[in-house]
Image (spheres, coloured by chain):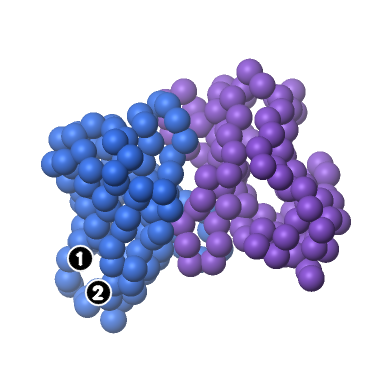
Amino acid sequence: GESVGLHLPTLSVQEGDNSIINCAYSNSASDYFIWYKQESGKGPQFIIDIRSNMDKRQGQRVTVLLNKTVKHLSLQIAATQPGDSAVYFCAETLFTGKLIFGQGTTLQVKP
Amino acid sequence: DGGITQSPKYLFRKEGQNVTLSCEQNLNHDAMYWYRQDPGQGLRLIYYSQIVNDFQKGDIAEGYSVSREKKESFPLTVTSAQKNPTAFYLCASSIARTAGAQYFGPGTRLLVL
């Protein structure tokens, strides 16, 4: 199960499939972007970041893509596992340092 | 949760009472932040501090106060003036206000008796 292009509040995927979580950011002047994962009752956990001079960055099982033309950010999770179930937030940082959080997406992983 | 600790995990406040939430970090970060999260909503900035003995109001500072006497510590007081304090409170820190990602603590859930 994948979603491309549109922000969905909830994304349900089968265990082992790839997940794509989308985020539209608001300010064309934002120069630094972060993806966070928040499990129920816990604080947000840093996953991966990307600067505006890049369009792709890879981590362990995760890839972030940045399209500045349309102000769009996506998080790809490979081989999604039950432990990936959480709410995922994107955040953009203005030059002032202010962090602006996007709408969260709840990822549900079906066994 | 990195090197950021928050205590207590749960806190109960009686009407008219001030309560203080603790936040400590051992990451040697200069900047620290307090956010409030309500159910199903994003994070809203209460206060932030860029350096010791300095702090600035965020978007929803009314009814809250902070201090930054030590680099490692940034306690938040929820005063009796905050009429709707029930929420999940998150502390974060970063290398500097304008550099690096913010890393979050585990949170404190404040409930009103």
Chain for numbered disc 1: B
- Front residue of B76/A111: it is A111
Which quadrant of the view contains residue B99?
top left
**2 or 1: tag closer to the N-terminus:** 2
Q: Quadrant of the N terminus of chain A?
A: bottom right
Q: Is residue A26 visible?
A: yes
Q: Which chain did the image draw in blue?
A: B
Crowding around mark 1 (Cα neighbors within 10 Å: few <14, some 14 to 19, many 20+) is some
As drawn, B9 above or below A95? below
Which numbered disc covers residue B19? 1
Residue at image coords 71%, 38%: A63
Which quadrant of the view contains residue A54?
top right
User: Is A91 left, or right, of B33 in this rendering?
Assistant: right
**What is the x, y in percent for residue A67?**
73, 27
Q: Which residue is mark 2?
A: B13
Task: Give, as a three-letter code, the residue at label 2.
Answer: Arg
- Front residue of A47/A11: it is A47
Q: Is residue A10 visible?
A: no
**What is the x, y in percent for residue A80?**
75, 56
User: Is A25 left, or right, of B53 in this rendering?
Assistant: right
The residue tagged with tag 2: helix, strand or loop?
A: strand
Q: Quadrant of the C terminus of chain A?
A: bottom right
Badge 2 and badge 1 in a common chain: yes
Crowding around mark 2 (Cα neighbors within 10 Å: few <14, some 14 to 19, many 20+) is some
**What is the x, y in percent for residue B45?**
39, 46
Q: Which chain did the image draw in purple?
A: A
